[in-house]
């Protein structure tokens, strides 16, 4: 899972940058994202269903683009013993968490976490490619054009007949001018597609959609609350800490942005078959 989701967690990516600037050392400042299992609005129940579906195709190689700490990657490997995986991300701290988790689960010999850009990566083709909220990691283009380029790259990175799990943001309905003004900086109505257009783009890129599902309100609320919770609790008890003012500003800003895209921005989880 990635640091960004090309959705509301694109905002999360911007605030994560502030996180790293405020707390250069792991023990300095608020703890980081310990309440999140996935860095996406993804429930345990949905994750279990997705893993079973992907495992059913019997992948031997798994590539996770913008993997973060690679929770879903590790879950796939745990149920497909013959599979090996590679997770690619640019966030060293998340990759370190992924390595620790892999070691704890006895998967370290079958997975590699690599700190590098995914743009133009030569690590495919793989039987299964995961790209959860990280399509922007595959393209330098501005939204929404990056979605088209990312889909082409995903088709290049997956073997014929293989699967791609794409987690991608979409507008559940057109945002109003006022809602856009409250979202991330320079948010635009053309920044995301609607779900139907997203599916059409996937088909045009050489995929057939095996399964289409979208995050529900409970998943979004668990994700957004979990994203903030560690720092909120820390701030409540450290109001005089040197990092308190910056942390408060970041938390309040992100909460206000969430309230603007809440119910407007969606997350699609598309299981795509390479045609």
Image (spheres, rainbow, N blue to C red):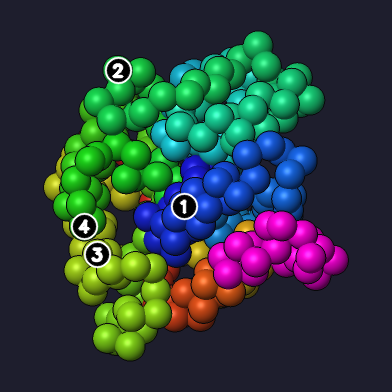
Residue at image position (73%, 50%) is 29
Q: CA distance from mark 3 to mark 4?
A: 5 Å
Return the residue found at the far top. 109
Residue at x-position 24% and y-position 50%: 147
x and y, in percent, of residue 75 in the image: 64, 35
Of the two numbered discs 3 and 4 on the same chain, state the one appearing first in sequence.
4
Between marks 1 and 3, how big is the CA–CA gap? Answer: 16 Å
Mark 2 — residue? 122
Q: Position of residue 224 (x, y in %)?
A: 59, 66
Residue 99 against residue 137 in the figure, above or below = above
Give 16 or 207, whichever is nearer the viewer.
Answer: 16
Q: Please provide the residue range marked out in magenta.
A: 231-251
**Disc 4 and disc 1: Cα gap in Å?**
17 Å
Quadrant location of the C terminus in the rendered image = top left
Is label 2 in a helix, a strand or a loop? loop
Based on the displayed image, in which of its 4 quarters is residue 160 positioned?
top left
Q: CA distance from mark 1 to mark 2?
A: 25 Å
Q: Does residue 86 appear in this view?
A: no
Mark before the other along the chain sequence, 1 or 3: 1
Which residue, given by chain and number where applicable, does mark 4 sit on? 144
- Residue position marked by numbered label 1 in the rendering: 13
Do residues under tags 2 and 4 come within 8 Å of each other at their CB atoms?
Answer: no
Residue topped by disc 3: 191
The residue closer to the viewer here, 252 or 141, is: 252
Of badges 1 and 2, nearer the viewer stands 1
Question: Tag on residue 152?
Answer: none
Q: Nearer the viewer, mark 4 or mark 1?
A: 1
Q: Going from the N terminus, do you reach mark 2 or mark 3 first? A: 2
């Amino acid at each position: 899972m990635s640091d960004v989701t090309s959705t509301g967690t694109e905002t999360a990516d911007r605030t994560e940058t502030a996180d790293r600037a405020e707390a250069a050392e792991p023990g300095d400042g608020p703890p980081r994202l310990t309440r999140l299992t996935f860095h996406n609005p993804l429930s345990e129940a949905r994750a279990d269903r997705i893993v079973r579906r992907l495992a059913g195709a019997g992948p031997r190689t798994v590539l996770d683009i913008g993997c973060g700490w690679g929770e879903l990657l590790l879950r796939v490997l745990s149920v497909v013993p013959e599979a090996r995986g590679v997770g690619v991300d640019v966030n060293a701290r998340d990759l370190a968490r992924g390595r620790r988790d892999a070691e704890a689960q006895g998967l370290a010999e079958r997975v590699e976490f690599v700190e590098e850009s995914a743009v133009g990566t030569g690590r495919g083709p793989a039987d299964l490619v995961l790209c959860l909220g990280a399509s922007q990691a595959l393209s330098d283009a501005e939204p929404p054009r990056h979605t088209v380029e990312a889909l082409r790259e995903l088709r290049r990175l997956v073997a014929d007949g293989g699967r791609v799990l794409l987690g991608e943001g979409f507008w559940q309905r057109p945002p109003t001018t006022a809602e856009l003004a409250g979202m991330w900086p320079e948010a635009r109505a053309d920044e995301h597609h609607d779900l139907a257009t997203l599916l059409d783009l996937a088909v045009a890129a050489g995929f057939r959609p095996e399964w289409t599902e979208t995050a529900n309100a409970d998943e979004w609320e668990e994700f957004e609350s979990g994203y903030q919770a560690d720092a909120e609790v820390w701030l409540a008890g450290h109001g005089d800490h040197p990092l308190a003012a910056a942390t408060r500003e970041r938390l309040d800003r992100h909460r206000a942005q969430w309230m603007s895209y809440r119910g407007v921005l969606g997350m699609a989880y598309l299981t795509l078959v390479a045609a």
